[in-house]
Image: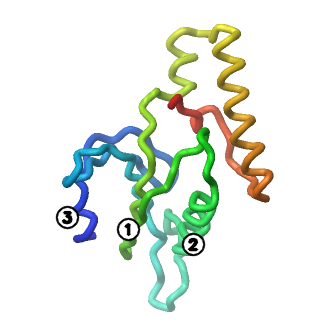
Amino acid sequence: MEQFNKLYLLGEKIGDGNFAEVKICECRKTGKKFAAKIIKMKRKTVFGNYDPNSRGMTPEEVEREVHVLRSIDHHTIVKLYEIYEHEDYSIIILELVTGGELFARVAEFERLEEQEAVYFISQTLLGVHHMHQLGIVHLDLKNLRFHQK
């Protein structure tokens, strides 16, 4: 992780999930901001297999996610830039989306205008359609996954 720390400065937490948290990170050289998805890795037992009680992802699961993100190039899906791996965690550098969560917007205003709803739904379906054309199925679509670019 020394290489990551040389290149990036971690900032505030902007999201989390079962096995990961997302923080803003800034490139020390350019000042450009990205999203750093910090994924907790599963622990191995003394026998070399993964501890079933350990929370996290296996290296194979992280590699699958990285492979999928690298194979997708679509304006409605965040871009992957780099990955840094460590025994305890992996850090995926992603495009920073600053428009906020769709869920938070609906919660704040209690509803969306029809044109806004049409826009969000159409953008979501465009992204899902693109993934399906590539043979990729997203198995965990939910409102917390949608952000405004």
Mark 2 residue element: loop
Residue 6, disc: 3
Mark 3 and mark 1 in contact? Answer it, CB < 8 Å. Answer: no
Give coordinates of residue 107: x percent, y percent: 54, 16
Give coordinates of residue 26: x percent, y percent: 26, 48
Residue 106, disc: none
Q: In this view, does 110 lie above or below 98?
A: above
Q: What residue type is labelled 1?
A: Tyr
Residue at left offset 61%, top offset 39%: 76
Residue at left offset 47%, top offset 80%: 44
Instruction: Write down the residue under mark 1.
Output: 84
Instruction: Write down the residue under mark 2.
Output: 52
For the residue pair 21 and 28, the one nearer the viewer reads as 28
Quarter where residue 24 is shown: top left
Q: In this view, does 82 lie above or below 73?
A: below
Give coordinates of residue 77: x percent, y percent: 59, 44
Closer to the chain start, of discs 3 and 1, is: 3
Residue at left offset 36%, top offset 73%: 86
Closer to the chain start, of discs 1 and 2, is: 2
Q: Nearer the viewer, mark 1 or mark 2?
A: 1
Instruction: Point out the residue furthest to the bottom here.
Output: 47
Q: Which amino acid does label 3 sit on?
A: Lys
